[in-house]
Amino acid sequence: MLLALRSILLIALGSAGVAHAAEVQVAVAANFAGPLARIAEGFGAATGHALKVSSGATGKFHAQIVAGAPFEVLVAADDETPKRLAAEGLAVAGTQFTYAIGKLVLWSAQPGLVDDQGAVLGAGKFAHLAVANPKTAPYGAAAVEVLKARGLADVLAPKLVTAESIAQAYQFVSTGNAELGFVALSQVAVPGKPVVGSYWLVPPSLYGAIRQDAVLLKAGEKNPAASALLAYLKSDAAKAVIQAYGYGL
């Protein structure tokens, strides 16, 4: 009888734990999809919550959220989109914060093609240069800034291949559809994996700081798991992952 009561109690406690676990609908900028997958593991272990993640261009997420997409947290590639969503009444005021500073690289899957000064851009001995859409992807906008700073925007315009997101820009280069392209450092320098090809870490003086902000969306205002995710992004455990992928804090 005592053993049976103990079994019932354990089942009840287990059910209570499951009841407290929840799912968070997250829209994440494509450049941060890899780091967020690592962070999700620690978040799940610490809280029991799970993430349902969609990755893509920040500008496209803005349009989807305005159209009623049920995202609860936005992990953006800029700081303007979360601010804009708050002004539009679609994000919770006061919840926005910078979780990372992005770093831009010029990358090629071919070893030795990209030098450590980016001189390959001026030489122009390539057919295609991949960039994310500057209208919707902050890293694409940063890439255009670099080309303008180098005085190469007009010269290289015919060679540009515009991708929907930084993830697609990476795909264009990795598959050889473009010899080189501007992508995020986090996509090239993955912790625990050797760097493929060659890259130039673009000096931050050539483009505006890529401040990547996260914000609680109105759809997630009553979901404690959504607030818990934002809190976890500020934790030492999450920061360690963010830095390991080459971001600044």
Image (cartoon, grey):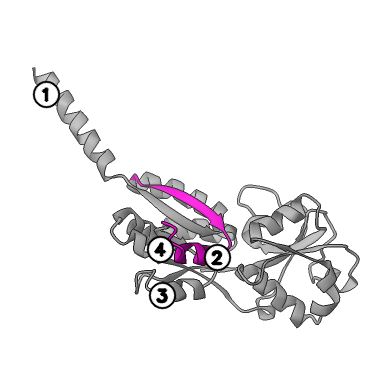
Query: Which class describes the residues within 10 Å of circle 4: few (<14), some (14-19), or many (20+)?
Result: few
Determine whether the residue tagged by mark 1 lies in a helix, strand or loop.
Answer: helix
Q: Earlier in the sequence, mark 2 or mark 3?
A: 2
Q: Which mark is residue 58?
A: 2
> Which of 31/248 is in front?
31
Identify the amino acid type marked 3.
Glu
**Residue position for label 1:** 5
Q: Earlier in the sequence, mark 3 or mark 1?
A: 1
Q: Are marks 4 and 1 in contact (CB under 8 Å)?
A: no
For marks 2 and 3, give the CA distance: 16 Å
Q: Are marks 4 and 2 in contact (CB under 8 Å)?
A: no
Residue at 76% x, 55% y is: 173
Q: Which mark is residue 88?
A: 3
Kindly indicate the quadrant of the structure image that contains residue 158.
bottom right
Can residue 68 be found in the magenta stretch? yes
**Residue position for label 4:** 234
Identify the amino acid type marked 2.
Thr
Label 2 or label 3, whichever lies nearer to me, is 3
From the viewer's perspective, tell me whether residue 8 is left or right of residue 235: left
Determine whether the residue tagged by mark 3 lies in a helix, strand or loop.
Answer: loop
For marks 4 and 2, give the CA distance: 21 Å
Residue 180, percent from left and from top: 79, 61
Residue at 34% x, 59% y is: 220
Q: Earlier in the sequence, mark 4 or mark 2?
A: 2
For marks 4 and 1, give the CA distance: 42 Å
Q: Are marks 3 and 1 in contact (CB under 8 Å)?
A: no
For marks 4 and 3, give the CA distance: 25 Å
Residue 65, percent from left and from top: 46, 63
